[in-house]
Amino acid sequence: MKLYSPAVIMALKEKHKFRISKSLGQNFLVDQNIINKIIESAEIGEGDLVLEIGAGMGVLTAAAAEKAARVVAVEIDKNLLPVLKDALDGYGNIDIVNGDVLKMDLSELVGRSREGTAAAGAAAAGSGKTVVIGNLPYYITTPAIMKVLEEKMAVERIVVMVQKEVADRIGAKPGTKAYGAITAAINYYCTISVEKDVPRDVFFPRPNVDSAILRLDVRKEPPVSLVDEKAFFACIKAGFGKRRKTLQNALAGLYGLGKQEVGEALQSAAIDPSRRAETLSIEEFAALANSIRHTANSISPACR
Ligand code: SAM
């Protein structure tokens, strides 16, 4: 069945009495070139397991299933389940899982799919890598990406359609207006590439914003050496939480440190205390976090 035209979507919608939900970010892909570009960028091998976030009517799911050993596709809207069953009939390597991706234990889900137990009668996936794909609902873009990365679930790569503005933010360079906490955090976990800008008319219904395909290759090793990973993220959060303040002011209070102690920690990390978070590279955030942690430990060993 051709899944990639508005007419097919309308026919499935009629047949299953399905209502498109704007609040769940249901803008379905109707352009085969864009579907192909996502699948190509994901570099799916035949032994791989693909985790798809937001299956919708199954266009990406089907394309991924052509390449992968197994696809586990999460979809929150139970009204789409009969549509998916209909559209993906004939594929023996797809598990559709109904639920909210933000509330799932994704490592466990991927593990079950690998063992072939996520759906009754499912075959086990090969021993290849795990790749995450999705045309992400805009309201969960950042939490969904961060959840995959923070769960440290041995994912090789994430290739997702996101709002263009979010892709620009994630791919931003230090010192630019778009650079923010999410840029620094994702840079720690991944190398980032904005693969393609995508116009709004490749979706049905058409959204109000343009999109982009984002590719995140998960690093095998962290790019910086940290004494305490939590301190690194705490510095990013505090720095960008008050991004118009100098780092000395923005970080005061972190680990109970006063402004003067923060100033000293900044200086021993060779960072001018009057700089702002948006100017720091992740190497500088790492030096700052290590220095802040050292200062906090020397003042109050209880912080350890
Ligand atoms: N992959 C399909 C496509 O490209 O046509 C659908 C993409 S649509 C932009 C996003 C899909 O994610 C919708 O089907 C929506 O119901 C689903 N979704 C929204 N929130 C979700 C969540 N928290 N967990 C899982 N799926 C979600």
Image (spheres, rainbow, N blue to C red):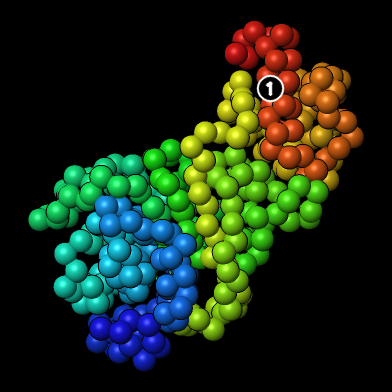
Residue at 19% across / 69% down in the picture?
91
Image-based side of 262 in relation to 96, left or right: right
Q: Residue at x 33, y 42 (%)?
A: 107
Quarter of the image where one finds residue 268: top right
Q: Quadrant of the N terminus?
A: bottom left
Can you identify the residue that label 1 sits on? Answer: 290
Residue 177 location, quadrant: bottom right
**Taking 139 as reference, is 260 above or below it?**
above
Picture quarter with the C terminus: top right
Spot occupied by residue 94 in the image (x, y as percentages of width and height): 23, 62
Q: Residues within 10 Å of mark 1 (few under 14, many from 20)?
A: many
Pinpoint residue 182: horizontal percent, then vertical percent: 63, 48
Closer-to-camera residue (238/71)? 71
Q: Left or right of 206: which side holds 131?
A: left
| 90 w.r.t. 43: above or below | below
At 66% from the left and 43% from the top, the residue drawn is 184
In this picture, residue 121 sits left or right of residue 280? left
